[in-house]
Image (cartoon, grey):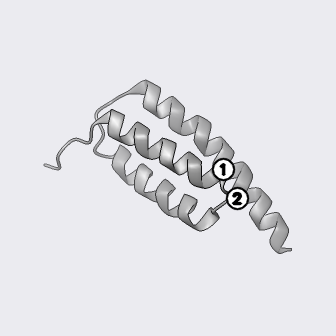
Amino acid sequence: MPEKVASPFVAKVIGDWYGFIKKQDILKAETMRNEIVQAFENMEEDQNVLLYFNLIDARYKMLAQEFEGSKA
C-alpha cells in the first residue's frame, strides 16, 4: 500500500504551483498540476486542501484559456 502524503505538503506544492501560474509559466504549471493530481490519490483527506486546489485550479484554467487563445 502506498504511503500517505501529508496534506500540508500538498498545500505547499499548490502554493508553489500558484507561483508558476502568476509568472504565466504554462509548461511548469501544467507539469505541477499533474503532480498534484497524482498526490491527491495518496493524500490524507483534507477538505481545506481540496478547496485550495479548486480555487487555484480555476486560475490555472483561466491562464490555459488565455494561452490557447493567443495561439490562434
Query: On screen, 15 above or below 37?
Result: above
Q: Earlier in the sequence, mark 1 or mark 2?
A: 1
**Mark 2 residue element:** helix
Q: Residue at x 83, y 65 (%)?
A: 69
Q: In the orientation shown, which residue stands out farthest toward the bottom?
A: 72
For this orientation, the residue located farthest to the right is: 72
Q: Give the answer, above or below, for where 54 lies relative to 71.
A: above
- Dot 2 corresponds to which residue? 64
Q: With 19 as the anchor, is 12 left or right in this view?
A: left
- How many marks overall? 2
**Residue 11: percent from left, percent from top:** 42, 37
Q: Amino acid at mark 1?
A: Lys
Q: Residues within 10 Å of mark 2 (few under 14, many from 20)?
A: some
Expressed as whole percent of the image width and height from the top left, the position of residue 3 reads 17, 46
- Residue 66's disc is none
- Residue projecting furthest to the left: 1
Tell me the CA gap for discs 1 and 2. Answer: 12 Å
Q: Considering depth in this image, is 8 or 44 the residue closer to the camera? A: 8
Q: Amino acid at mark 2?
A: Ala
| Residue visible at 70% across and 58% down in the picture | 64
User: Quarter holding the C terminus?
Assistant: bottom right
Q: Report x, y in % for residue 53.
A: 52, 38
The residue depicted at 52 percent of the width and 30 percent of the height is 51
Residue identified by numbered label 1: 22
Please, what secondary structure does the residue beneath circle 1 have? Answer: helix
